[in-house]
Image (cartoon, rainbow, N blue to C red):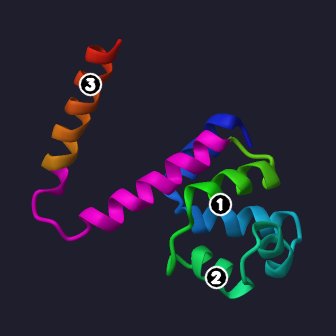
Amino acid sequence: MTKYVKTILFKMDTLGDIIRKQREEKGLPLRIVAGFLNIDQAILSKVERGQRKASKEQVLKLAEYFNVDREQLLVAWLSDKIVYELSGEEFADKALKVAESKMEYKKCKNA
C-alpha cells in the first residue's frame, strides 16, 4: 500500500480500528500490547472497540511500538475526540469551520 492510500485509510478509521489492524497484522495478542502499555488487556480491548479513550501518552507509545507515523495516530486520536464531543450537535459542521479559521488565525498571529 502506498503512503497516500494508508493516509486516506487512517483518516477514516478510528484510533481503535488502527490499533487493532496493526496488532492483528503483526500477529500480536492483546495481552502483549497491553503489557507494553502497562494496562490491562480488557482496557486495550475497549480502546480498540471505541468504548474507552486512550491517553496521548499511550498513543505515542503505540506509534513507537508499531513503528507507524505518530502524526497519523495523533490525528486519528484527536479526530475521535472531536467527533465524540460534537456528535449529535446541530451546528457541529459550522462550529468546525469557525474553529478551523480560528486555528489559522492563531498560527498567523503567532508566526
* Residue 78 sits above or below residue 52 on the image: above
Residue at the (35%, 12%) spot, across then down: 111
Q: Is residue 97 left or right of residue 72?
A: left
Circles 2 and 1, Cβ within 8 Å, touching? The answer is no
Q: Which residue is mark 3?
A: 106
Q: Is residue 65 left or right of residue 87?
A: right
Quick one: 5 or 54, which is closer to the camera? Answer: 54
Circles 2 and 3, Cβ within 8 Å, touching? The answer is no
Residue at the (52%, 53%) spot, across then down: 76
Q: Which residues are magenta?
A: 70-93
- Circle 1 sits in a helix, a strand or a loop, which is it? helix
Say which label, 2 or 1, has the lower sequence index. 2
Q: Is residue 36 left or right of residue 55?
A: right
- Circle 3 sits in a helix, a strand or a loop, which is it? helix
Distance from the alpha carbon under mark 2 to that under mark 1: 12 Å
Residue at the (23%, 22%) spot, across then down: 105
Residue 48 image point, x, y percent: 61, 74
* Residue 91 sits above or below residue 6 on the image: below
Label 3 CA crowd tier, 10 Å (few <14, some 14–19, many 20+):
few
Kind of residue at disc 2: Ile
